[in-house]
């Protein structure tokens, strides 16, 4: 019940986006704008080998001739890609050897975030702190990587992408861009050209990663788009659970975030990828200032009987454009997608998943809960497809939308493509408003209207919250509360 | 972007293709590299169509040319009528036809509409505009029996007034490429829509049932049931969109699409969309695609039915749920027989 109590307290306490603050740390910027020289600059700053620079330049050339996708149900002014910074790094010249050397302001940022994962203790190196490996991304450069040794003992590689490029080039060369090809889409291609940093995970055969891996993303520098690139490889029979959480400070100008996440699963491997996203959604009245979140996330179940599970709680960003996908190639592989997307104010979310069944007896499950309040728009867009070879493919999809307020919008746009006679696809969707009867009942029992809404909404999203790792579930429940703050009455 | 504008202008680039979101599964531009010349006129007498001699009046469009008195398409207030409307293609080449139907206040029409391919290889476009005044009722039963090599597009726009009732059942066995599209402007205001369809495809046939219902006002209901059976290398497409505009409260809209896929080379593509801008609504859609229920089949064979018979019975019962919702009894019987013919072929 602690979580429920916390939820209630949070709703009372919260008037505004708590995480809206800008930390002033000396930044090392690349000049504004985007051209081949900027790409060289980024690559040079990161001491990358020649092959990586070529990869980036190749991506940049392809990006130049691509068009921005227009099909999503989101509206925003055209982005001027020349009016952005593509590289910003905290200005320490050398990598910190211990936490004491980390800029205290950066640590203060974590403190302000009130992260429930006890990252404070972890980052501060407190004895007996829970064992979460944290690869904290502060703007574009990984600042601290903890628990590396313990992971190394079992052979797990968990480091920043730049480090992986230097130290494990064979793995990076083999897998980078193999799930999301360079020219997969406009934003992924841009990411390939200018990606700043991100996490790299390799779990060797048969290893069950001894701890949950987590990354905190945080956009900090004024006007600097962030281009994370994450690559997770689970070798045969390996298991890893990865957590990702995001907050960003308040500012006036829209920020672009175009990340790419690639998951590779070999035989009998399993990856659980959980995201809680609460980036600044923009001014509730004008919609000004929010983050643009254009992310490409994809898992490739190459091995037989492999399993991938995406869980996401999307509450922030002015615009969310995100479709974590599963390519179910291996025989008997399993894809899961659990999502809560909440929009309030002027937020726009166009999110969903793709389940691409290529192998025989592949199974997938999609549970999506969308909540829209205020003047926001929330779209579920998903694809389920079965290739002729995907004999016995099965999918179950459930998309429920909840509307709060007369001016909000909820859309469901599923695409279903069945190309063989033995697949079974089921899809159910409903759209309703909060039940007056249930609200009345709860309020009659002494709950305020806001509390009653909390209670009903938490019930509505329970199926998904259950899928989150414990420590995330608490944070997520709080977020659900915060996001719907002020949407009724 | 439509077949009609392409035929009119002779400009093949105006054809919709797979790059157009609404046509991604029914690519005309990739299929038709050149537009065929206009079909010749024909005076030959027509054989009986799928609806035989049911009803009081017949209007036919033979290769796009009107036969019969179009006055029958306008019903004054309170009038009622059973009308056969036949789109017949008797020759190769291309043709287009456009028809307007108007129902006055409280009028009632049973529209028995058929698409008949008496020749093959034609490219046909049919456009209908149907307007219902307050309290008018229209039941539309469509049997699309196009030829195997035909390219056929039929698009209908329905505009409803308050308290009007529009019910539709489409049956088709497809064509080389076929699209039957229905767009309904739904004012709410106690107007009711039933929008059913079934596609029964075999060989290399293709059928695309597309519907758009826009709820513009309060208190509207829409009930939609589409079923499909595909075998061999055929391809069925269902695109259903229900839009509930801002302020269209107390809308009750339900959409179902269930399809049976009976061969490994057949394909079904479905996109059941809900676009909702109002909060006090009840909207749902369901979509299932799968093979015949093996357990039901086993049960029936256990009771002594041969497998082919058991399969046929199960499929007929599956499709029958759509056809049974037809109100006009003689039309329902003809539709059932027509569907059974297709399923047992």
Image (tube, grey):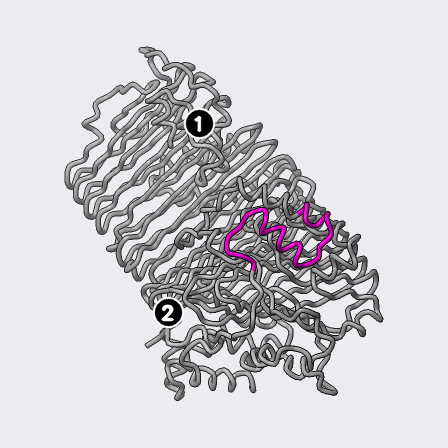
| Quarter containing the C terminus of chain A | bottom left
Q: Residue at x 15, y 40 (%)?
A: B77
Q: Residue at x 35, y 41 (%)?
A: B168
Helix, strand or loop at label 1? It is: strand
Total number of numbered discs in the rendering: 2
| Quarter containing the N terminus of chain A | bottom right
- Looking at the image, can residue A348 be seen? yes
The numbered mark at residue A284 is 2
**Of A298 and A200, the residue lying toward us:** A200
**Of B112 and B241, the residue lying toward us:** B241
Q: Is residue A95 magenta?
A: no
Q: Is residue A281 above or below residue B304?
A: below
Mark 2 and mark 1, same subunit? no
**Residue at the spot of label 1:** B145
The answer to whether B114 appears left or right of A418 in the picture is left
Task: Check disc 2: other Cα within 10 Å, few if <14, some if 14-19, many if 20+.
Answer: some
Residue at mark 2: chain = A
The answer to whether A328 appears left or right of B254 in the picture is right
**Of A78 and A337, the residue lying toward us:** A78
Label 2, label 1: how many angstroms apart (C-alpha)?
55 Å
Nearer the observer, disc 2 or disc 1? 2
For the record, the magenta segment spans: A30-55
Extreme-left residue of the structure: B77
* Image coords of residue A366 (percent x, y): 58, 59
* Image coords of residue A455 (percent x, y): 46, 79
- Looking at the image, can residue A355 be seen? no
Occupied quadrant, residue A167: bottom right
**Of B155 and B220, the residue lying toward us:** B155
The answer to whether A100 appears left or right of A448 in the picture is right
- Dominant SS of magenta comes to helix
């Amino acid at each position: 019940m602690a979580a429920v109590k916390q939820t209630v307290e949070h709703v009372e306490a919260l008037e505004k986006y708590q995480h809206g603050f800008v930390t002033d740390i000396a930044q090392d910027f690349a000049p504004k704008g985007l051209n081949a020289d900027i790409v060289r600059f980024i690559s040079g700053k990161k001491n990358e080998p020649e092959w990586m620079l070529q990869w980036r330049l190749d991506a940049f050339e392809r990006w130049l001739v691509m068009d921005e996708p227009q099909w999503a149900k989101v509206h925003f002014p055209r982005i001027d890609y020349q009016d952005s910074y593509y590289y910003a790094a905290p200005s320490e010249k050398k990598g910190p050897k211990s936490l004491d050397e980390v800029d205290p302001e950066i640590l203060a940022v974590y403190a302000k975030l009130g992260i429930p994962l006890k990252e404070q203790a972890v980052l501060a190196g407190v004895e007996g702190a829970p064992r979460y490996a944290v690869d904290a991304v502060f703007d574009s450069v990984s600042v601290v990587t903890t628990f590396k040794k313990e992971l190394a003992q079992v052979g797990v590689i968990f480091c920043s992408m730049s480090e992986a490029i230097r130290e494990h080039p064979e793995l990076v060369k083999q897998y980078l861009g193999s799930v999301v090809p360079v020219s997969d889409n406009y934003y992924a291609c841009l990411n390939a050209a200018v990606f700043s940093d991100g996490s790299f995970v390799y779990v060797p055969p048969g290893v069950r990663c001894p701890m949950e891996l987590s990354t905190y993303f945080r956009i900090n520098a004024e006007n600097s788009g962030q281009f994370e690139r994450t690559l997770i490889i689970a070798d045969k029979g390996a298991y890893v659970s990865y957590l990702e959480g995001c907050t960003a400070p308040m500012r006036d100008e829209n920020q672009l975030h175009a990340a790419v996440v690639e998951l590779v699963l070999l035989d009998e491997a399993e990856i659980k990828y959980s995201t809680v996203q609460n980036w600044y959604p923009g001014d509730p009245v004008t919609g000004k200032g929010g983050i643009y979140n254009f992310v490409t996330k994809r898992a490739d179940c190459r091995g037989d009987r492999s399993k991938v599970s995406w869980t996401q709680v999307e509450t922030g960003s002015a615009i969310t454009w995100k479709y974590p996908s599963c390519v179910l190639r291996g025989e008997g592989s399993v894809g899961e997608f659990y999502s809560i997307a909440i929009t309030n104010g002027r937020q726009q979310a166009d999110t969903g998943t793709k389940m691409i069944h290529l192998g025989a007896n592949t199974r997938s499950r999609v549970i999506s809960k969308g909540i829209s309040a205020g003047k926001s728009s929330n779209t579920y867009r998903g694809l389920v497809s079965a290739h002729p070879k995907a004999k016995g493919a099965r999918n179950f999809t459930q998309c429920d939308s909840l509307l709060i307020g007369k001016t909000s919008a909820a859309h469901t746009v599923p695409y279903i493509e069945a190309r063989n006679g033995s697949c079974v696809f089921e899809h159910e969707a409903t759209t309703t408003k909060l039940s007056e009867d249930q609200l009345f009942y709860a309020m009659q029992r002494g709950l305020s209207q806001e509390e009653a809404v909390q209670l009903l909404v938490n019930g509505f999203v329970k199926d998904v919250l259950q899928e989150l790792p414990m420590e995330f579930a608490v944070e997520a429940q709080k977020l659900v509360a915060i996001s719907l703050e002020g949407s009724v009455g | 972007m439509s077949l009609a504008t392409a035929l009119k202008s002779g400009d093949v680039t105006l054809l919709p293709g797979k790059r157009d979101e609404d046509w991604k599964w029914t690519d005309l531009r990739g299929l038709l590299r050149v537009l065929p010349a206009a079909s010749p006129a024909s005076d030959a007498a027509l054989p009986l169509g799928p609806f035989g001699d049911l009803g009081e009046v017949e209007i036919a469009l033979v290769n796009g040319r009107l036969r019969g008195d179009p006055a029958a398409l306008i019903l004054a207030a309170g009038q009622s009528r059973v009308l056969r409307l036949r789109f017949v293609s008797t020759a190769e080449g291309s043709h287009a036809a456009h028809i307007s139907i108007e129902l006055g206040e409280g009028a009632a029409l049973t529209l028995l509409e058929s698409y008949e391919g008496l020749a093959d290889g034609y490219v046909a476009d049919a456009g209908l505009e149907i307007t219902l005044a307050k309290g008018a009722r229209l039941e539309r039963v469509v049997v699309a029996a196009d030829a195997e090599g035909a390219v056929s597009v039929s698009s209908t726009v329905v505009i409803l007034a308050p308290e009007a009732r529009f019910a539709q059942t489409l049956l088709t066995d497809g064509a080389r490429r076929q699209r039957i599209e229905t767009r309904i402007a739904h004012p709410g205001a106690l107007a009711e829509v039933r929008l059913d369809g079934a596609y029964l495809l075999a060989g290399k046939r293709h059928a695309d049932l597309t519907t758009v219902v826009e709820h513009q006002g309060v208190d509207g209901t829409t009930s939609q049931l589409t079923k499909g059976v595909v075998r061999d290398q055929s391809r069925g497409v269902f695109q259903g969109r229900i839009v509930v505009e801002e302020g269209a409260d107390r809308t009750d809209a339900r959409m179902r699409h269930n399809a049976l896929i009976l061969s490994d080379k057949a394909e079904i593509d479905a996109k059941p969309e809900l676009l909702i801008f109002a909060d006090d609504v009840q909207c749902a859609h369901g979509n299932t695609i799968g093979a015949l229920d093996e357990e039901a089949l086993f049960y029936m064979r256990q009771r002594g039915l041969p497998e082919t018979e058991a399969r046929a019975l199960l499929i007929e019962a599956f499709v029958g749920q759509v056809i049974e919702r037809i109100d006009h009894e003689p039309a329902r019987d003809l539709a059932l027989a027509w569907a059974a013919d297709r399923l047992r072929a």
